[in-house]
Image (cartoon, rainbow, N blue to C red):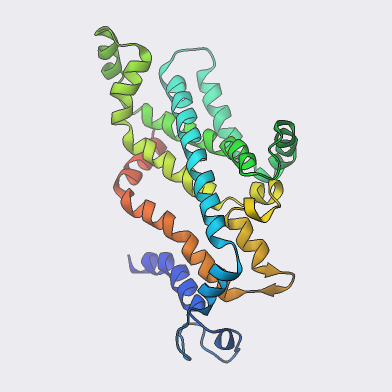
């Protein structure tokens, strides 16, 4: 486990060490990159919090990621249940088409999506991201939950419907409580991808008050060929904290949902 642990923790160590160095030591080519020789300082964090709108970007990212996660989980759950449980012509083809949709790179989609964003009048606002992020999150969530729903015996909901429950009631009262690991897996993936997505946020938002973390950090702390490495590492470290907390709280259920959904289709 030691090599894997080192591989996973080294980026955080590097960000922490770099963010605690002064600019003098940071740009000294003779200084050791793996240690702090001249004393730790918080000037990089002060620069980040005082001279940039980092807290505003953090709030924007939290709003966008939360709303998009709710939309994506809801839509993908209904779509996955329909494909996995309902018998209709072309269900298997439809399931494969969903997965192929997820494989289309965002670099090809942001151009037609920009016309959609302009049509709805949400350009240069967080609503543009809320509208476009589900286009790549819903296919992935649907594919993952299709496999998970197939691991749940059909007899459970059939018994509920024999007792008078409707299809929706059986889904809500019987299937969803059992599917918590799968739902959490989709929610964590959706939140993580929405939290760190860059291309759509860069293409659809230009005003500083509407920016999210990835775009705000990249555009405000990289100016031409000048990189504010200390502040960049501080921002990257602080931006990773919410994701780390989410993963640490739901690791067990996340692994269970991921393995179940990935091994049966």
Q: Residue at x 32, y 48 (%)?
A: 250
- Figure label count: 0
Closer-to-camera residue (174/212): 212
Q: Position of residue 193 (x, y in %)?
A: 52, 47
Is residue 265 visible in the rendered image? The answer is no
Position of the N terminus, as image quadrant, is: bottom left
Is residue 137 visible in the rendered image? The answer is yes
- Left-right relation of 96 to 3: right
Q: Residue at x 52, y 74 (%)?
A: 46
- Left-right relation of 57 to 148: right
Closer-to-camera residue (42/181): 42
Closer-to-camera residue (39/244): 39
Q: Is residue 117 above or below residue 59?
A: above
Q: Is residue 227 above or below residue 58?
A: below
Q: Quadrant of residue 187?
A: top left
Q: Position of residue 173 (x, y in %)?
A: 29, 22
Q: Residue at x 67, y 62 (%)?
A: 219
Closer-to-camera residue (48/144): 48
Q: Position of residue 52 (x, y in %)?
A: 60, 66
Q: Position of residue 37 (x, y in %)?
A: 47, 90
Q: Is residue 34 above or below residue 245?
A: below
Q: Residue at x 49, y 28 (%)?
A: 75
Position of the C terminus, as image quadrant, is: top left
């Amino acid at each position: 486990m030691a090599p894997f642990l080192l591989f996973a923790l080294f980026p955080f160590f590097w960000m922490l060490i770099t963010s605690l160095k002064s600019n003098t030591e940071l740009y000294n080519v003779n200084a050791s990159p793996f240690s702090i020789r001249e004393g730790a300082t918080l000037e990089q964090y002060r620069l980040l919090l005082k001279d940039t709108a980092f807290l505003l970007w953090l709030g924007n990212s939290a709003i966008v990621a939360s709303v998009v996660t709710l939309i994506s989980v809801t839509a993908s759950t209904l779509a996955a249940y329909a494909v996995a449980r309902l018998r209709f012509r072309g269900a298997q083809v439809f399931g494969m088409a969903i997965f192929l949709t997820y494989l289309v790179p965002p670099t090809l989609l942001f151009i037609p999506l920009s016309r959609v964003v302009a049509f709805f009048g949400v350009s240069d606002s967080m609503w543009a991201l809320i509208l476009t992020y589900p286009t790549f999150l819903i296919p992935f969530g649907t594919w993952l939950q299709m496999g998970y729903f197939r691991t749940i015996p059909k007899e459970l909901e059939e018994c509920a419907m024999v007792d008078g429950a409707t299809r929706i009631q059986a889904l809500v009262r019987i299937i969803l409580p059992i599917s918590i690991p799968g739902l959490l897996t989709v929610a964590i993936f959706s939140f993580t991808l929405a939290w760190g997505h860059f291309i759509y946020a860069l293409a659809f938002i230009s005003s500083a008050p509407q920016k999210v973390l990835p775009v705000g950090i990249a555009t405000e702390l990289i100016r031409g060929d000048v990189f504010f490495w200390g502040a960049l590492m501080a921002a990257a470290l602080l931006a990773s904290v919410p994701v780390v907390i989410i993963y640490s709280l739901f690791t067990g259920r996340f692994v269970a949902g991921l393995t179940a959904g990935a091994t049966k289709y």
